Each structure stands twice: as C-alpha cells, then as structure tokens.
Image (spheres, grey):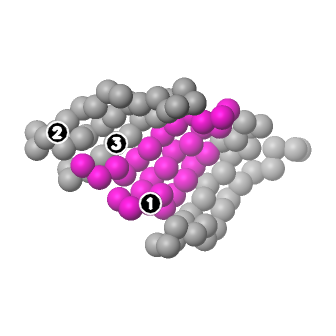
Amino acid sequence: LLSLLGSNGQPAAALSVGLDDAPFLSLFDPMGVERLLMGAVAGATVVNLGDGIRPRLVLGVAENGRPSVGFYGDDGALRSELSVDTKQ
C-alpha cells in the first residue's frame, strides 16, 4: 500500500494490490472518504465512483471486451445498466 496524505493528514490517494494481486488506485475527498476506485480484477477493468458510502456509478470492461455502465441507487441496488453486445 502506498498512500498520499493531504495537508490535513487524511488520505488523498492510494495505490494498493489485493490478495489476488489485482492493482487498485483510490482517490479520496478532503475528509478522507474514498470517492473513486479503479482496478483491474480477474481480467476486467473497473472504475467505481461513489458517494462516500457505496459505488453509485460503475464503468467496466469485462474480460471478453464487453463495456458497461451501471447506475446504483441509495440502497446499493443496480437501477440501470448500459452495455454493448460485443458479438456483432
């Protein structure tokens, strides 16, 4: 884990590697709450934009190349998803 702290001592950015060797980059708001998480997990690439509690917008490209955008509600439930069928 490599963390960069802001002038208030709160995390501003972090680079980490998961137990499965997946790399992650996190960005935090001034209060130290994670707002953005990017990673490469199990052959997929994901970008999670959160409200400080849970992801609200998830951008991804699956291992098979299928891109998607997921929109999540206050309760964390998927509300809408946009994706492209790669079998054309």
Magenta residues (range):
32-60
Which residue is located at x 52 percent, y 36 percent? 39
Return the mark for residue 54: 1
Q: Residue at x 70, y 41 (%)?
A: 62
Q: Nearer the viewer, mark 2 or mark 1?
A: 1
Residue 15 appears left or right of 62? left
Residue 69 vertical position relative to residue 61 in the rendered view, above or below: below
Quick check: marks 3 and 2 in contact, CB under 8 Å? no
Q: Amino acid at mark 1?
A: Arg
- Indicate the position of residue 75 as horizontal and vertical percent values: 50, 73
Q: Is residue 63 left or right of residue 12?
A: right
Residue at image mark 2: 6
Question: Tag 3: residue type?
Answer: Leu
Whether residue 61 is in magenta: the answer is: no
| Mark earlier in primary sequence (3, 1) | 3
Q: Quadrant of the N terminus?
A: top left
Would you say the residues marked 2 and 1 are in contact, meaning their CB atoms lie under 8 Å apart? Answer: no
Q: Which comes before the other along the chain, label 3 or label 2? A: 2
Residue 28 is situated, as x and y percent measured from the top left of the image, at: 30, 46
Give the residue at x 61% y 55%.
69
Please tell me how crowded label 3 is: few (under 14), some (14-19), or many (20+) other residues with Cα within 10 Å.
many
Q: CA distance from mark 3 to mark 2?
A: 11 Å
> Closer to the N terminus: mark 2 or mark 1?
2
Residue 72's tag is: none
Hey, which quadrant is residue 21 in on the image? top right
The residue singled out by tag 3 in the image is: 27
Q: Could you say whether the residue bearing mark 2 is in a helix, strand or loop?
A: loop
